[in-house]
Image: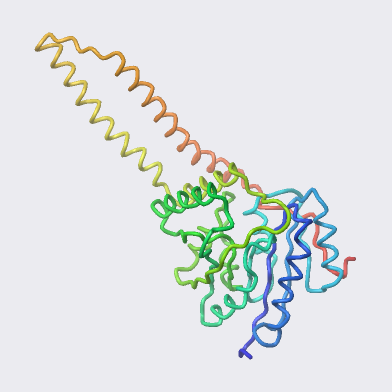
Amino acid sequence: MHKNLKSLSIVLPCHNEEDVILDSYNKIIDIINPMLGEYISCYEFVIVNNGSTDASIQEMLKIVSIDENVFICDLRRNFGYQGSITAGLYHASKDMVISMDADLQDDPTKILDMIKEHYKGFDLVLGVRSNRKSDSIIKRMFANIFYFLTQKINKETIPHHGDFRLMSKELVEDFKLFKERNRYLRGMILSLDSQYSVVEYSRQPRIKGKTKFNVIQLFELAIDGITSFSITPVRFITLFGILMLFVSIFFITYILIQKLYFGVTVEGWAFTAIAICMFGGINSFFIGIVGEYVGKSYVEAKERPLFTVRKFISQKDL
């Protein structure tokens, strides 16, 4: 038995998880119950209903009816994956807060390892995938490219760390001070504390239901990860523009010398057309990058809420 036992919150963000939420609860509770009195003093489940359109809420109510330590945070609409985790963290009340996916792909048997690392003095314990065998080849390739780019641009990146992590209550309170609407939680939370521990786990294949992440959503997450914590892309545009300015001056000088001093007519309409198309495409790409930052500034300026809650449901409300 560990001295000075702490309480535990489990945050489960859910969007259309009617097939798996009850199985997730049963598996996690079977792991948590033996810890009571040994590693934790008590527990709570914060199940976030993130605008589900299936029967997820009915399945959640079944869980609430059998466990007084479970409550539902029912959001008014879908606020995105990052928004749903944020809602769960904001309303978790225990000493240790673990966020994890509700699809059982995050290994719940690693919860105890995370708690042990926390008792060693770490306020932040990250779950890091030791392999991505359960992912498709395309998703693995995309993930490798994403982590390569984010590591080059943003040093606060841990490859293959998703949103399976343990945070102390104090760290969650610090997290609440971050008010930005454009949320890339993996970067935000890593910026809170430079000292953290890592627990490796094998990502499991989804047993029931369908993944809620498609290629477009993964691409959007990648863009957020790259642009939310660094102005490096904009700085690259500036440096590239300066380089192209000097290259242009060189070629203009060369053409004028050929024409004025040697009477040579410089041909190359094909080259000119290709150059115009190429630099037109580059300019459009760069304008798009700048537009991402302008768009994020626009969203931040409106100061809309991160999420809105329809109601909280606990056993006493049934």
Q: Is residue 282 depicted above or below 131 in this figure?
A: above
Residue 45 occupies quadrant: bottom right
Residue extending furthest toward the left: 261
Q: Provide residue 13's location: percent of width, then percent of height.
A: 69, 59
In the image, taking residue 305 as reference, residue 224 lies left or right, namely left
> Which of these two is toward me, 45 or 217?
217
In the image, taking residue 18 as reference, residue 211 lies left or right, namely left
In the image, taking residue 286 as reference, residue 34 lies left or right, namely right
Q: Is residue 193 depicted above or below 19 in this figure?
A: below
Q: Provide residue 203's location: percent of width, then percent of height.
A: 58, 62
Q: Provide residue 257's location: percent of width, then percent of height.
A: 13, 16
Q: Provide residue 110's location: percent of width, then percent of height.
A: 60, 73
> Which of these two is toward me, 194 or 203?
203
Q: Is residue 67 depicted above or below 239 in this figure?
A: below
> Which of these two is toward me, 91 or 197?
197
Q: Is residue 28 depicted above or below 103 in this figure?
A: below
Colour scheme used in the picture?
rainbow
Q: Say which quadrant the C terminus sits in.
A: bottom right
Q: Residue at x 55, y 53 (%)?
A: 184
Q: Residue at x 57, y 81 (%)?
A: 116
Residue extending furthest toward the right: 318
Q: Residue at x 33, y 22 (%)?
A: 275
